[in-house]
Every structure is written in structure tokens, then in C-alpha cells.
Amino acid sequence: MDLKSGLPFWLIRNGLTKDYLTLDDNIETEILIIGSGITGALCAHFLCEAKVKCIIVDKRMASTGSTTASTAQLQYEIDVFLFDLIEKVGEENAVKAYRKCLESIYTLEKIIKKLKIDGDFDWRSSLYLASNAAGLKDLKKEFDVRKKHQLPVTLLTQKQLKSKFNIDKKGALYNDCSAQIDTFKLCNAILDYHKKHSGLLVYSHTDVVKIVNKKDHIIAHTANKNTIKAKKIVAAPGFESQNLLKEKVIQLNSTYVLVSKPMKPNDFWKEKCLIWETARPYIYIRTTEDNRIMVGGFDEPFQDPERRDKLMEKKNEAILKRFKKLFPDSKIEIDFYWCGTFGETKDGLPFIGEHKDHPNMYFALGYGGNGITFSVIAAEMIKDLYIGKPTDSDLFSFDR
Ligand SMILES: Cc1cc2nc3c(=O)[nH]c(=O)nc-3n(C[C@H](O)[C@H](O)[C@H](O)COP(=O)(O)OP(=O)(O)OC[C@H]3O[C@@H](n4cnc5c(N)ncnc54)[C@H](O)[C@@H]3O)c2cc1C
């Protein structure tokens, strides 16, 4: 699958990271992880910390799937409002899922500090703007539910939004516990750390094309006709799960991102907070370490790369126009742009854990606009499942 096109900023900013060798032998391990994006890297992290012997393989160069294309905003609020999620999965589970997303941001910060690695992690405040009267009504309802469940949130009126942020919208939800990262840098740093310190083996350009279950082990066959024998497989293939899983669990969408030239310090809004909005299609906004503005959005409900790429110029214009409506005085100019694929589930939650038709496998399918927070949750949960620690994996099970 063609996951992205254009010039993903992170790849240019970080340059080519160290590549890994292609597997050319038959090998054996305790756990095989398929996919070296941020999900696979975090799975490797938790398993290595639990002293489990792991091998990670990727059919591409390490970390160059969707992880390279991400805008990497970390927010506890998922694409689906909490009040909507309650309708879909019940109050207890919905609130648990939101809390887990919040915790996952702190967990990621702890990992970065513990390993002393760099992923440009920065705490940020976040604004969820009401684009119109209907949006404001939804945000008020959402505010009440989140307050009831003691989730961190403030409701800003139109006047407060204007005076504090100089943004002219009907109101907004505000929180100060969001963050932003460079996922590509972080993913590579995690792989590198565990390769050096935990004996993690990483193979790129190693495509798993067939999986065969045996009584007490599982064998992955690669396109190069090698085998990897393992006790368990962790599938972290990103949006290409359809090759490993028969049923369709996601709707694939295309999304578009642009990055500005570096801006002067006073070209930014207060707190350089993350911004998104209730309008559909929406835009989402963040800044980068080197003082650029990154704006994404204007999603399309299809994945076809040819159709997706043809729309790139038009989407840039639309994103820029929406941004300028919000910040009419901005001198923003585009430096890089790209488009990527992302998947959504019906209820906005990921699929994590075992699947009845795939014994000896764990799936880490963290979908949606909050894929990275879901990756953290999936990685820790799968480690716990493997070592036999109780988990809340029912929340994200395939038969929920
Ligand atoms: C434009 C864009 C913006 C986004 N913004 C955000 C955001 O702001 N916040 C957020 O949390 N999330 C965001 N996301 C989502 C987030 O980036 C993804 O959820 C996350 O990067 C997925 O990581 P992953 O490791 O699961 O998948 P990937 O990075 O795609 O990694 C999976 C890897 O598995 C490999 N693979 C697949 N099948 C096989 C196989 N059979 N054999 C071997 N290897 C295989 C692939 O080559 C790939 O490298 C965004 C996504 C996009 C595209």
C-alpha cells in the first residue's frame, strides 16, 4: 500500500536515519514484532524492559510508514466526543478509554526521560474551537461530561477566546495537558536504544507474507523465503493490517499536511497551543521545534493514492485559506507538504490484543487521529498480556 506522498517534513529534518539489514537467514526468537513504526517500536520497548527477547521486522526502511507522515499531536481527546463514545461503548468504558489516552501522554514522557532519548517531546496546551453554533452546543455538552468525570478541561467563551488567544470563534475547549513530538525521531531513537542496550534485533526490507501456527509456536515466512520462529507474534503493521487480518476493521482515509517556512517569534499565537476545530472537514495546527507552523486536515474518505495525490495542490489551498481565516494577519508561506493515509474505526477506539482466529498473535492496531496515544496503550497492554498481568484489553477487543 502506498501510505504517503510528497515531502514529509520529519524525513527531511532528520535526514536518513540508520537503516538495518535485511533478514537473510532462518531465525528464532521469543517474540516477533511485525512493523517498526512507532507502535512496533513501543511494543519492543515494553517487551525489552520486561526482559523478553524480541525481533522486529519491517518491509520498508525502519519507521518510514505512517509514522513519518504524522503531525504527532498528543491529545487525550479522541476524534469521537466523549458523549458520543458513551453512546457507543457505555459510560464506564468510554471514560476509561479517555483516561488511558491522558495517561499515555505521561507514559510517553516517562519513557523518553528514562531512556534519555530525544523525540522533541513538548507539553502544549490545546484548543478545540467551536466553528459554529452547532459546534459550540456540542462543546458545551462535551464540557459537562468531561467535568463530571474529572477530565482536565476548561470552556472558554467567545470573549475569553478573543482576549486570551486573539481567535475569533464562538468558544473553545481548552486543556493544558497535551503534547507534541517528532514521532519519526522518537521511533528511531527507541529502536536504536534497545538495539544497543537490550539486544533487540531489527531487520528492514523484510516482508512477512505468510504466518503459520503450530502447536506451541508460530512461524512467519518472509518474501525472501526465510522463516522466523517465535512463541508469539505482535502485529503492528499500521494501516496495512488487512494483509494479516481477514476482516475489515478500518475505514481508510486520506489526509493532507503542510509546513510553513520558519516564522518570527511574534508570528505565533499564545502558548503555541495545539488547535483543532469542530468543523468537518477540519484543520489541525501545531508548531515545530524550528519555529514553523504545521497545518493538516481536509481529509477525504478514500485511500486511492492516485486520486489522493491529484488533490494535493487543491487541498493545500483549502488548508491555507482556513488557516488564514483563523489568523488573518499571518504571513504563513508553504515550505513542505505531503499527504498520508490514516484509518478510523466505527467507535474511534483501537483494536488491541488477541484475535480468536489468530492464535499466538497480539494485534496493536492504534487507529484514528490519536494513533500515537493508542500505540502507547497497545504496547504496554500487550506486554502485560504476555507476562500474564491483568489488563483492560476488553475495552479494545475485536469483539467489543
Ligand atoms: C498525516 C497524518 C497525521 C497524523 N496526525 C496524528 C496526530 O497528530 N496524532 C496522533 O496521535 N496520530 C496521528 N496520526 C496517526 C499516527 O501517525 C499513526 O497512528 C501512527 O504513526 C501509526 O504508527 P504504526 O507504527 O502503527 O504504523 P506505521 O508507522 O505505518 O508502521 C507500520 C509498519 O509496519 C510495516 N509492515 C506492514 N505490514 C508488514 C508486513 N507484512 N511485514 C513487514 N512489515 C510490515 C510497514 O512497512 C510500516 O513501516 C497521523 C497520521 C497521518 C498520516
Image: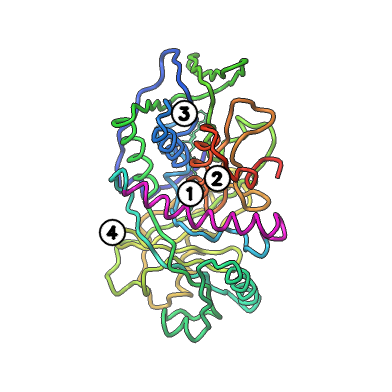
> In this image, 314 relative to 270: left or right?
right
Give the colour scheme shown: rainbow
Mark in front: 1 vs 4 = 1
Is the residue under label 2 in contact with that under label 3 (CB below 8 Å)? Answer: no
Residue 89 to residue 133: above or below: above
Residue at mark 3 = 59
Label 4 residue near ligand 1, CB within 8 Å: no
Label 3 residue near ligand 1, CB within 8 Å: yes
The local crowd at label 2, few if under 14, some if 14 to 19, many if 20 or more residues have their Cα within 10 Å, is many
The local crowd at label 1, few if under 14, some if 14 to 19, many if 20 or more residues have their Cα within 10 Å, is many
| Label 1 vs 2, first from the N-terminus | 2
> In this image, 367 relative to 174: left or right?
right
Callout 2 secondary element: loop
Label 1 residue near ligand 1, CB within 8 Å: yes
Q: Residue 80: x, y in percent? A: 62, 59
Is the residue under label 2 in contact with that under label 1 (CB below 8 Å)? Answer: yes
What residue is at 38 percent from the left and 78 percent from the top? 329
